[in-house]
Each structure stands twice: as C-alpha cells, then as structure tokens.
Amino acid sequence: MTDPRAAVEYRLPAVDLRKGDLVNTTPGEDDWQEVVGVYRQADDAKSTEIRTLVSTLGGRYVVVQLTDLAPVDGGVYFDGEGAATVYGDDESEDQAVADIVSSTDGVRTYLYTKYELVTVRATSS
C-alpha cells in the first residue's frame, strides 16, 4: 500500500517549471522553495524590473521567483520567560525563533538556463 503523502523527486528543464512547483535550490541540503513565478518572455512579467531583466536575456535563460523560507535547523524549546528559542550548535548560541524565521513575503529570484535541470518534488495529491 502506498502512502498518499509520499513525495517523489525528479529533475526537469527549468523552462518547464510552473507556479506551485517545489524546487530544491540546493540539492543535498534540502532547501525546498515554492515557485511563485516563471518568466520565459518579457510579456509573462507584471513588474517592470522582471520584464526588463527577461528582455535582456534573449530567451537563453528563464527567470524564476521562489519563496524565501529559511529552514530552522535546531530544536525549539521555551526559555524561562516562555519565549520560543532554537538550540544553537557548537559554533553558535541559542537564538530566539523570532530572530531567525523568514519574513512572510520573502522572494528569491533565480536565473536558470532554459536547458538547466532543476530538482522538483511531486506529490500524489
């Protein structure tokens, strides 16, 4: 019996990315981000900045915008005052959760060659 929550990773050309895809920006380190925009042609873009960027690339690259959610790599505990805190590692001290989580509207912009293979996660849902 298969678990409907299971995910499969595969690689596809960046030109085939779609809004909503989950992309591993750093394979081996599991930095998964959701695609929020894919711009192959200047007319695909709403903002002047992205439209101008795409225009200068001559169709050789795909501009992809992704969420920017930083992973929290340590366990969380509540300090004596009830503040959520993340355990540090050997090189860093414990930090307040509020100091290390990403802003709600963070976006990363990437340039991929139109032939570049990108690791994507698919789910059965």
Image (spheres, rainbow, N blue to C red):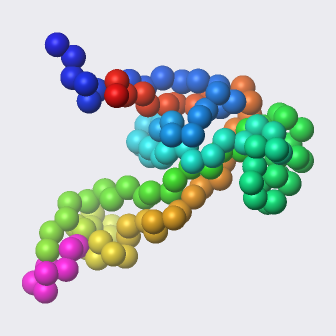
Q: Is residue 64 visible?
A: yes
- Where does residue 45 sit, x and y in percent of width and height? 75, 49
Q: Quadrant of the C terminus?
A: top left
- Where does residue 73 sit, x and y in percent of width and height? 31, 56
- Where does residue 32 sit, x and y in percent of width and height? 44, 44
Q: Quadrant of the N terminus?
A: top left
Q: Is residue 25 visible?
A: no
Q: Quadrant of residue 35?
A: top right
- Name the outermost residue toward the top: 1
Question: In the picture shown, does residue 47 fall above or below 119?
Answer: below
- Name the outermost residue toward the bottom: 81
Horizontally, residue 51 falls left or right of residue 122, namely right
In the image, what residue occupies the spot 82% across and 44% down? 43
Question: In the picture shown, does residue 18 fall above or below 73?
Answer: above
In the image, what residue occupies the spot 38% across and 70% down? 100
Horizontally, residue 100 falls left or right of residue 45, namely left
Horizontally, residue 79 falls left or right of residue 26, namely left
Is residue 55 or residue 10 the one in the foreground? 55
Specify start and end residues of the magenta stretch as a single range: 79-85
In the image, what residue occupies the spot 15% across and 69% down? 77
Question: In the picture shown, does residue 29 fall above or below 10?
Answer: below
In the image, what residue occupies the spot 51% across and 36% down? 21
In the image, is residue 82 part of the stretch drawn in magenta?
Answer: yes
Is residue 76 or residue 56 the one in the foreground? 56
Q: How many marks?
A: 0
> What type of secondary structure mainly makes up the magenta span?
loop
In the image, is residue 71 part of the stretch drawn in magenta?
Answer: no
Horizontally, residue 98 falls left or right of residue 1, namely right
Question: In the picture shown, does residue 13 fall above or below 32?
Answer: above
- Where does residue 124 sit, x and y in percent of width and height? 34, 24
